[in-house]
Image (cartoon, grey):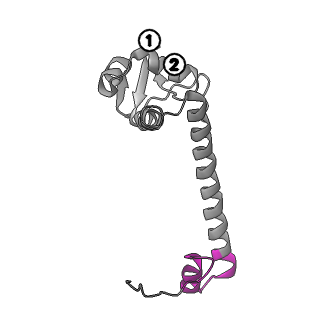
Amino acid sequence: MRKRTSGAKEKDNRTTYHISSVSRRYNIHPQTLRLYEREGLLWPSRSEGNTRLYTDEDLKQLELILNLVRDLGVNLAGVEVVLNMRTKIERIETEVNELLEFVKKEFFSGREDEFESKRSGLVPLTQTKIVKI
């Protein structure tokens, strides 16, 4: 789960949205957005006046949360588990890719074509024809 950075307020050129516009856009009450923040599911940045500012990244996270809650019927505890698992999976994918790059560099230097052919699958499969009955 992403954690809030203490005291650091990012100032960049990202587009931000106020809580009222986000609640209208997604047809949810502003208190629901505040609840998601209290539960640690959303992390909007804050303006100088302490107003919540949602970025496009926050909106993607909100869309995922709403999909889980509205469409799949997942409760907030389940949403937290799903978000944590997604974060872990992304971290593992990054680590595996780093390992593959290391192996490629150390063992296949000069033989990149051979590495790419072996990277596509652990078990080689032969193509079979489909027979219609």
Image quarter in which the N terminus is found: top right
Residue 109 part of the magenta segment: yes
Q: Residue 94 sits in which quadrant?
A: bottom right
Q: Is residue 76 above or below residue 124?
A: above
Give the x, y percent position of residue 41: 54, 29
Q: In whole angstroms, how far apart are the C-alphas of marks 2 and 1?
A: 20 Å
Dots 2, 1 in contact, CB < 8 A: no
Q: Amino acid at mark 1?
A: Gly
Q: Residues within 10 Å of mark 1 (few under 14, many from 20)?
A: few
Give the x, y percent position of residue 107: 69, 80
Residue shown at 55% from the left, 79% from the top: 116
Q: Which residues are magenta?
A: 104-125
Q: Secondary structure at mark 2?
A: helix
Give the x, y percent position of residue 8: 56, 26
Residue shown at 56% from the left, 28% from the top: 76
Residue shown at 34% from the left, 17% from the top: 20
Q: Is residue 89 left or right of residue 47?
A: right
Q: Say which mark, if any, is on residue 95.
A: none
Q: Is residue 57 above or below residue 36?
A: below
Q: Is residue 44 left or right of residue 118?
A: left
Residue at which label 1 appears: 49
Residue at which label 2 appears: 35
Q: Amino acid at mark 2?
A: Leu
Image quarter in which the C terminus is found: bottom left
